[in-house]
Image: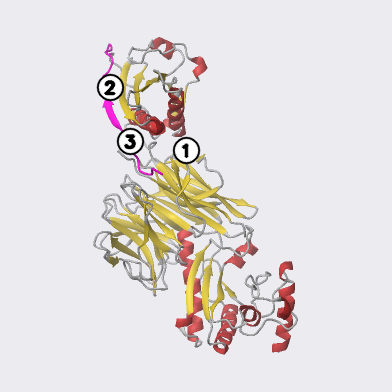
Amino acid sequence: MKFKLFMIAGMSAVLAACASTPPATTEAPPSEPPQTTRTDTPGTVDQGPVPGTEAHFVATAGDRVFYDLDRSTLTAAGRETLRRQADWLNAYPGTDILIAGNCDERGTREYNLALGARRANAARDYLVSLGVSPSRIQTVSYGKERPTCRESSERCWALNRNAITMISGGVTG
Amino acid sequence: MTLIFRLLSVLILLSVPSAALAQQPLQVDIARGHLEPTPIAIPDFIDAGGTDSRGADIAGVIAADLESSGLFTTVDERAFIEDIQDFNLRPRFQDWRVINADALLIGQVTRQNDGRLLVGFRLWDTRLQEQMVGLQFVTAPENWRRVAHRVADAVYERLTGESGYFDTRVIYVSEGLGPRGEPVRRLAMMDQDGANPSFLTDRSYWSLLPNYSPSAQQITYVSFLDGQATTYVYDLESGRQEALFASGGTGLARVDPDGQSLSARFSPNGEQLAVSIELQAGHDIHLFDLRSRNLRRLTEHPADDVEPSFAPDGDRIVFSSSRSGGSQLYVMPVNGGEAQRVSFGEGRYTAPVWSPRGDLIAFVKQHNGQFSLGVVDAGGSGEERILYQGYYVDTPAWSPNGRVILFTRGDRGREGTEYEIWSVDLAGFNLRRMPISGQSSDPAWSPLIE
């Protein structure tokens, strides 16, 4: 199973620019590639990302969870993704993460800064409940200021209602 | 860069003697004046030597100010009959009556021996043939636009009976994308009419949600300089800024290191800030004393309480909260205590700002995919009026006299919503786009500076 996932991850890194559906490790609604596959190096594509790297994290766990309109409660799919994130984080205990909460553009600015913080906190709290030390986790809200998807469409708004987990420290390789 | 307005010396000009007639003086109805704007003639101010046609520039700025209010219309100068040569003589009123100028504004610019400009004006009621107001300003030559705004304020005040708002500035967020497609949010400042734009912050970090202090010497804003939303105070004269609630060692009031702090508004006396700060339990409204540096928590509800704004009497604070499900507006005493809901319509209410007149609270409402800018009775009757409805609305900002609202208006664009600052009057008329190049948002309107 793990091997298969790595293969798919390698493909997704290659096809990232084509907006292919990311590996089954990311939850359902969006058809958008993970945004943060920046640590890929040319020699590693065929084997998948180097274990312990952010690319590896994205490929094996999925780096983001999505929220319903105006909500900050985790969905079943979101909890599933966070369980994989917790597994990965528990396997690489030297890493630290930053969780960024984001909102769609259909809300006022300050309201969305608060809502984004709630989304990041919901993800953090669930990871902590799964054994990830809170000292490894930082959160930030970007409100509606940093959309993944720029169109004004329901599809993009759904993609932009998220909490994205980024490896912020302790990456090996 | 001189950010603070320099004081001008002002002298009242005595009226040129006139024959008093028993008639109603000219009066502009501020609530209904837009239906029939008052015609005013504003000939170029007389250049009394060495002023490089500054007289025409000044008349142009005054005319643009008055027209922008929607309450006045300027008479086309090609219709003028009398050529005013001496502004100390009584005009030939018949010449101005026949071209339907109810009011006549004449003025003169003189360069004094010390290099400063002497600007005088007289406002005439052409029907009563009486001077309504006359003033004289002395100022440095580069301040000529300010003098023009002061004249426009004096005319507006004399004719409407309410204070003007033209000698003011606006701070806002200039929005864009950087070279790598990253969002850029910079604070910028301009005169109320769009002149003299300049940036206050650079593109290396986001600056959002500015608010003026009552003295116009400082602003608060939300800065991402430290990686997350943090309340800053920025001194406009010195350019110095400081984080108020940073989690690091530099902050003055320690808060939860993982929590953000949002937009802060000054109390009417300028001594306190109301601000929403994120604690473990969510966002709560706090009161921060700028002198003692004491931070006090005012709300303790588990729902997010954000966007606080003081009543002009300083006794109450309005804020938005999701405590009843969707976001609604609440008013509470400034010392905390029970909050009363003041918005009752359908939809999500956010971004409340108390009117400087005290009776109304401006808000943004989201309902059925549409956004509205509205005002609601601050007393809690729930009576509300919608002033603008469109694709997106945010951050209302009142003119200092409470008659005009600036707001962020968004329209659907190719790469997401495109933001501009617009104004609308309290009656929902006179919708105008602010002359700002590029995308802009989060207007903060300065008070009048005396």
Say which of marks 3 and 2 sits in front: 2
| Residue B291: image location, x then y, percent | 25, 59
* Real-space CA distance between mark 1 and mark 3, rounded to the nearest whole angstrom: 21 Å
Instruction: Pinpoint the chain carrying mark 2.
Output: B
Is B141 rendered above or below residue B90?
A: below
Label 2 crowding class (10 Å Cα cut-off): few <14, some 14-19, many 20+?
some
* Real-space CA distance between mark 3 and mark 2, rounded to the nearest whole angstrom: 19 Å
Label 1 crowding class (10 Å Cα cut-off): few <14, some 14-19, many 20+?
few
| Residue B264: image location, x then y, percent | 37, 58
Mark 1 or mark 2: name the one nearer the start of the chain: 2
Q: Which SS class for mark 1?
A: loop
Instruction: Pinpoint the chain carrying mark 1.
Output: B
Look at mark 2 in the image and give the residue it sits on: B13
Outermost residue toward the front in this view: B114
Q: Which SS class for mark 2?
A: loop
Mark 1 or mark 3: name the one nearer the start of the chain: 3
The kind of residue tagged 2 is: Leu
The reply to whether label 1 and label 3 mark residues of one chain is: yes
- The N terminus of chain B lies in quadrant: top left
Q: How is the image coloured?
A: secondary structure
Look at mark 3 in the image and give the residue it sits on: B163
Q: Which residues are magenta?
A: B1-20
The kind of residue tagged 3 is: Ser
